[in-house]
Image (cartoon, rainbow, N blue to C red):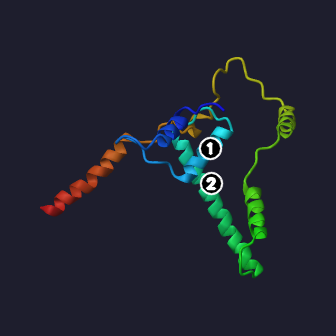
Amino acid sequence: MAAAGAGGAAAGAAAAAGGGAAAAPPLPRDAQLMISLLNQMDVPDWEPRVVNQLLEYSFRYVSEVTADAEEYKKHAGKQQLDADDIRVAVKLKDAQVMRPPDRDELIALAAERNKEELPPVEQHEYGIRLPPPEQQLTALNYQIGRKRAAQEEPAQARQKKAR
Protein backbone atom coordinates (compact mmCIF):
# COMPACT_ATOMS: atom_id res chain seq x y z
CA MET A 1 0.00 0.00 0.00
CA ALA A 2 1.12 3.51 -0.72
CA ALA A 3 1.55 5.89 2.17
CA ALA A 4 -1.12 8.55 2.25
CA GLY A 5 0.02 12.15 2.03
CA ALA A 6 -2.17 14.82 3.57
CA GLY A 7 -4.87 12.34 4.59
CA GLY A 8 -2.35 9.85 5.87
CA ALA A 9 -0.64 12.55 7.90
CA ALA A 10 -3.93 13.37 9.59
CA ALA A 11 -4.59 9.70 10.22
CA GLY A 12 -1.07 9.21 11.55
CA ALA A 13 -1.41 12.17 13.88
CA ALA A 14 -4.71 10.84 15.15
CA ALA A 15 -3.30 7.33 15.58
CA ALA A 16 -0.30 8.70 17.48
CA ALA A 17 -2.58 10.54 19.91
CA GLY A 18 -1.98 9.50 23.43
CA GLY A 19 1.15 11.26 24.52
CA GLY A 20 1.80 14.97 24.86
CA ALA A 21 -0.46 17.96 25.32
CA ALA A 22 -0.61 18.77 21.57
CA ALA A 23 -2.06 15.39 20.62
CA ALA A 24 -5.01 15.53 18.24
CA PRO A 25 -8.27 13.97 19.39
CA PRO A 26 -8.90 10.48 18.00
CA LEU A 27 -10.84 10.31 14.75
CA PRO A 28 -14.39 8.96 14.83
CA ARG A 29 -14.84 5.34 13.83
CA ASP A 30 -16.53 6.25 10.54
CA ALA A 31 -13.65 8.55 9.57
CA GLN A 32 -11.17 5.78 10.37
CA LEU A 33 -13.15 3.40 8.15
CA MET A 34 -13.18 5.93 5.31
CA ILE A 35 -9.39 6.36 5.62
CA SER A 36 -9.05 2.59 5.60
CA LEU A 37 -11.11 2.43 2.39
CA LEU A 38 -8.90 5.08 0.77
CA ASN A 39 -5.78 3.14 1.76
CA GLN A 40 -7.24 -0.17 0.47
CA MET A 41 -8.01 1.50 -2.86
CA ASP A 42 -4.34 2.59 -3.06
CA VAL A 43 -5.19 6.29 -3.07
CA PRO A 44 -1.74 7.77 -2.46
CA ASP A 45 -2.68 11.30 -1.46
CA TRP A 46 -5.81 13.18 -0.40
CA GLU A 47 -6.82 16.33 1.39
CA PRO A 48 -8.08 15.85 4.96
CA ARG A 49 -11.46 17.33 4.01
CA VAL A 50 -12.00 14.53 1.47
CA VAL A 51 -12.74 12.17 4.34
CA ASN A 52 -15.42 14.53 5.64
CA GLN A 53 -16.91 14.95 2.15
CA LEU A 54 -17.07 11.19 1.65
CA LEU A 55 -18.68 10.76 5.07
CA GLU A 56 -21.27 13.44 4.30
CA TYR A 57 -22.06 11.88 0.91
CA SER A 58 -22.40 8.37 2.33
CA PHE A 59 -24.58 9.60 5.23
CA ARG A 60 -26.87 11.48 2.82
CA TYR A 61 -27.10 8.48 0.48
CA VAL A 62 -27.90 6.02 3.28
CA SER A 63 -30.43 8.44 4.81
CA GLU A 64 -32.24 8.90 1.50
CA VAL A 65 -32.27 5.17 0.77
CA THR A 66 -33.60 4.42 4.27
CA ALA A 67 -36.33 7.06 3.94
CA ASP A 68 -37.34 5.65 0.55
CA ALA A 69 -37.36 2.11 1.96
CA GLU A 70 -39.65 3.29 4.78
CA GLU A 71 -42.07 4.66 2.19
CA TYR A 72 -42.01 1.37 0.28
CA LYS A 73 -42.65 -0.51 3.54
CA LYS A 74 -45.69 1.67 4.26
CA HIS A 75 -46.97 1.22 0.71
CA ALA A 76 -46.67 -2.56 1.02
CA GLY A 77 -48.53 -2.47 4.36
CA LYS A 78 -45.69 -4.08 6.28
CA GLN A 79 -44.87 -3.46 9.91
CA GLN A 80 -41.11 -3.97 9.69
CA LEU A 81 -38.49 -2.79 7.24
CA ASP A 82 -36.83 -5.73 5.48
CA ALA A 83 -34.04 -6.35 3.00
CA ASP A 84 -36.43 -6.32 0.03
CA ASP A 85 -37.49 -2.75 0.80
CA ILE A 86 -33.84 -1.70 0.97
CA ARG A 87 -33.04 -3.50 -2.31
CA VAL A 88 -35.90 -1.74 -4.11
CA ALA A 89 -34.85 1.63 -2.67
CA VAL A 90 -31.22 1.14 -3.74
CA LYS A 91 -32.21 -0.04 -7.20
CA LEU A 92 -34.51 2.94 -7.77
CA LYS A 93 -31.97 5.36 -6.28
CA ASP A 94 -29.29 4.07 -8.65
CA ALA A 95 -31.72 4.38 -11.57
CA GLN A 96 -32.21 8.07 -10.70
CA VAL A 97 -28.49 8.78 -11.02
CA MET A 98 -27.72 9.86 -14.56
CA ARG A 99 -24.85 7.85 -15.91
CA PRO A 100 -22.65 9.18 -18.70
CA PRO A 101 -23.15 7.49 -22.06
CA ASP A 102 -20.79 4.76 -23.19
CA ARG A 103 -17.77 5.68 -25.28
CA ASP A 104 -19.22 3.89 -28.31
CA GLU A 105 -22.46 5.85 -28.02
CA LEU A 106 -20.53 9.12 -27.88
CA ILE A 107 -18.47 8.18 -30.93
CA ALA A 108 -21.62 7.29 -32.90
CA LEU A 109 -23.31 10.53 -31.83
CA ALA A 110 -20.25 12.59 -32.77
CA ALA A 111 -19.99 10.88 -36.16
CA GLU A 112 -23.65 11.60 -36.87
CA ARG A 113 -23.31 15.24 -35.80
CA ASN A 114 -20.09 15.74 -37.76
CA LYS A 115 -21.68 14.55 -41.02
CA GLU A 116 -23.16 18.02 -41.35
CA GLU A 117 -20.59 20.49 -42.61
CA LEU A 118 -19.99 23.80 -40.90
CA PRO A 119 -20.84 26.93 -42.87
CA PRO A 120 -17.82 28.39 -44.66
CA VAL A 121 -16.03 31.34 -43.09
CA GLU A 122 -15.68 34.26 -45.47
CA GLN A 123 -12.16 35.52 -46.15
CA HIS A 124 -12.68 38.98 -44.68
CA GLU A 125 -14.29 37.69 -41.45
CA TYR A 126 -11.97 36.91 -38.59
CA GLY A 127 -12.67 36.13 -34.96
CA ILE A 128 -16.08 35.64 -33.44
CA ARG A 129 -19.07 36.49 -35.60
CA LEU A 130 -21.48 38.69 -33.68
CA PRO A 131 -25.14 39.41 -34.37
CA PRO A 132 -26.17 42.77 -35.81
CA PRO A 133 -25.39 45.74 -33.49
CA GLU A 134 -29.03 46.29 -32.52
CA GLN A 135 -29.19 42.73 -31.15
CA GLN A 136 -25.94 42.86 -29.19
CA LEU A 137 -26.02 43.16 -25.44
CA THR A 138 -22.91 45.35 -25.64
CA ALA A 139 -24.75 48.06 -27.58
CA LEU A 140 -25.41 51.33 -25.78
CA ASN A 141 -28.90 51.27 -24.35
CA TYR A 142 -29.10 54.42 -22.29
CA GLN A 143 -29.80 58.06 -22.89
CA ILE A 144 -27.80 60.57 -20.89
CA GLY A 145 -29.85 63.76 -21.07
CA ARG A 146 -33.31 62.38 -20.34
CA LYS A 147 -32.41 60.48 -17.18
CA ARG A 148 -30.87 63.54 -15.54
CA ALA A 149 -33.89 65.67 -16.42
CA ALA A 150 -36.25 63.02 -15.06
CA GLN A 151 -34.35 62.97 -11.74
CA GLU A 152 -34.32 66.76 -11.40
CA GLU A 153 -38.08 67.17 -11.88
CA PRO A 154 -39.12 65.37 -8.66
CA ALA A 155 -36.41 67.21 -6.72
CA GLN A 156 -37.69 70.59 -7.97
CA ALA A 157 -41.27 69.59 -7.17
CA ARG A 158 -40.24 68.74 -3.59
CA GLN A 159 -38.50 72.10 -3.17
CA LYS A 160 -41.62 73.94 -4.36
CA LYS A 161 -43.83 72.01 -1.92
CA ALA A 162 -41.46 72.80 0.96
CA ARG A 163 -41.80 76.58 0.32
Relative vertical location of residue 118 with respect to residue 149 in this rendering, above or below: above
Distance between mark 1 and mark 2 Cα atoms: 15 Å
Q: Secondary structure at mark 2?
A: helix
- The kind of residue on which mark 1 rests is Ser
**Of callouts 1 and 2, the N-terminal one:** 1
Residue assigned mark 1: 36
* Mark 1 surroundings within 10 Å by alpha-carbon count, few (fewer than 14), some (14 through 19), many (20 or more): some
Across the whole image, how many numbered discs are drawn on residues?
A: 2
Q: Secondary structure at mark 1?
A: helix
Q: In the rendered view of the protein, which quadrant contains the N terminus?
A: top right
Residue 58 is labelled as 2
Q: Residue 129 occupies which quadrant of the picture?
A: top right
- The kind of residue on which mark 2 rests is Ser
Residue at position x 47%, y 48% from top? 26
Residue at position x 35%, y 46% from top? 147
Residue 50 is labelled as none
Contact flag, marks 1 and 2 (Cβ < 8 Å): no
Q: Position of residue 14 (x, y in %)?
A: 48, 42
